[in-house]
Image (cartoon, rainbow, N blue to C red):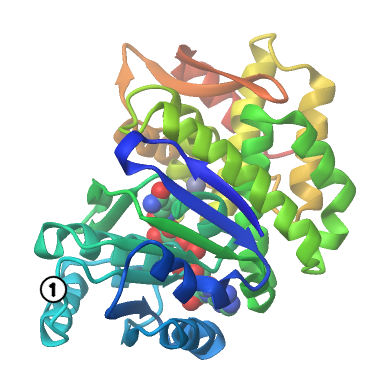
């Protein structure tokens, strides 16, 4: 088992990464002074696959474990579902000190996290992420959120967990497409921070795609390390944390224009290529590095070709999503692989040129 710490003063917490760490959850909670009741929030799919192991671990450590089930799907990240969970927590006599364990992907993590942040003005939250995306991204950093009307992830809070338990063995039951989707964020960490991680990915994609626990453990650890460092520097997202948005400026626009039919990782993959192409055109990222990045994204099984969306729709979505001032959009651009720069100097017309000139090439 590997342990990382997110250093946030009084809000610091550990991230435990390894195969089988789920079975240690009860012990780890006892060590941290929790006793009595513990509540798991999960969905039926994840519960059937991994719920027993977590529940047994809690029971063995002397906890009374209850499981609250939420159906699968992004649409569950709603005030209505949160309201239902508050009701169930009250029925279970959950107290200020009762830990809530979010067992699942980012949807469960965000929803259970929001509920933990607000119920009784905050009960302890333990993130137990079971998708690659959740282990490398959403479980770390304390952003919890719901969707409301057109406001995706806009109703939320900063609420750090007390512990993150990332059991690599849970990833083995993922649909391969969902694993691939999560790889986009891992590639992102390589581009913004860690060029050797890109080399590791290039050398080990076959092992990763075959769900090799050693290779998965390595990419989760290295990604989580980067996210933990960035978050420790900028807990409230007022500075450095912006670099985590690499690929997301265009990515979010693609998601919106596709009416959220395209997977997040696929949209981010395309957004990363768009930003890399912009950087290349601005004489920063070298052409060979751009090609290397595109090849890695393609080999990972993510798209490298922009679907046939209408350019004005994409631009409109980008204007809606991000601050656009005087015809400029804020971008995170790779200067070289492993280093990014935040800039307000990208013109809308360059973005248009890149997006419209890209379809015919790979
Ligand atoms: N809070 C943050 O900082 C942050 C960051 C990025 C994304 N997010 C949010 O995360 C969500 C996306 O998360 P996601 O990609 O994990 O999607 P998800 O939670 O919907 O999980 C994807 C699918 O995998 C299933 N699943 C989960 N674990 C499994 C396992 N071990 N085996 C088999 N199936 C499993 C889920 O039931 C679901 O069907 C979005 O709502 C997004 O807004 C939050
Ligand atoms: Zn993302």
- Where residue 254 appears, as percent x and y from the top left, is 48, 46
- Where residue 267 appears, as percent x and y from the top left, is 55, 48
The answer to whether residue 27 of the structure is visible from this angle is yes
Side (left or right) of 174 relative to 361: left
Q: Which residue is mark 1?
A: 83
**How many tags in the picture?**
1
Side (left or right) of 50 relative to 61: right
* Snapshot quadrant of residue 113: bottom left
- Where residue 114 appears, as percent x and y from the top left, is 24, 60
Side (left or right) of 293 relative to 323: right
- Give the residue drawn at x 42%, y 57%: 163
- Where residue 336 appears, as percent x and y from the top left, is 71, 19
Q: Is residue 29 above or below residue 271?
A: below
Q: Nearer the viewer, residue 258 or 293?
A: 293
Split into 4 quadrants, where in the image is the N terminus?
bottom right
- Give the residue drawn at x 55%, y 57%: 135
- Give the residue drawn at x 19%, y 70%: 82
Pointer 1: residues within 10 angstroms few (<14), some, or many (20+)? few
* Snapshot quadrant of residue 30: bottom left
Helix or strand or loop: what does disc 1 sit on?
A: helix
């Amino acid at each position: 088992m590997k342990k990382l710490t997110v250093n946030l003063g009084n809000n610091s917490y550990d991230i435990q990464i390894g195969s089988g760490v789920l079975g240690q959850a009860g012990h780890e909670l006892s060590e941290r002074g929790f006793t009595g009741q513990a509540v798991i929030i999960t969905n039926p799919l994840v519960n059937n696959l991994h719920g027993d192991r977590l529940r047994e671990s809690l029971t063995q450590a002397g906890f009374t474990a209850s499981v609250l089930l939420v159906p699968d799907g992004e649409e569950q990240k709603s005030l209505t579902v949160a309201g239902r969970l508050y009701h169930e927590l009250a029925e279970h006599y959950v107290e200020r000190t009762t830990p809530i364990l979010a067992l699942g992907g980012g949807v469960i993590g965000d929803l259970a996290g929001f509920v933990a942040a607000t119920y009784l003005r905050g009960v302890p939250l333990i993130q137990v992420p079971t998708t690659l995306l959740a282990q490398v991204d959403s479980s770390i950093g304390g952003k919890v959120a719901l969707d409301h009307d057109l406001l995706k992830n806009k109703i939320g809070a900063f609420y750090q967990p007390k512990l993150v338990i990332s059991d690599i063995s849970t990833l083995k039951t993922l649909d391969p497409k969902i694993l691939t989707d999560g790889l986009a964020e891992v590639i992102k960490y390589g581009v913004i921070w860690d060029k050797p991680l890109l080399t590791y990915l290039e050398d080990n994609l076959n092992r990763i795609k075959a769900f090799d626990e050693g290779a998965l453990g390595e990419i989760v650890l290295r990604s989580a390390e980067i996210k933990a460092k960035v978050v420790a520097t900028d807990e409230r997202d007022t500075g450095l944390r912006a670099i985590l948005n690499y690929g997301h400026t265009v990515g979010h626009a693609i998601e919106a224009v596709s009416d959220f039919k395209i997977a997040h990782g696929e949209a981010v993959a395309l957004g990363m290529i768009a930003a890399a192409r912009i950087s290349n055109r601005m004489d920063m990222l070298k052409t060979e590095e751009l090609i290397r990045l595109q090849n890695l994204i393609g080999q990972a099984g993510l798209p490298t070709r922009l679907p046939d969306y209408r350019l004005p729709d994409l631009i409109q979505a980008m204007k809606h999503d991000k601050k656009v001032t005087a015809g400029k959009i804020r971008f995170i651009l790779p200067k070289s692989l492993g280093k990014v720069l935040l800039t307000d100097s990208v013109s809308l017309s360059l973005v248009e040129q890149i997006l419209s000139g890209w379809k015919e090439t790979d």
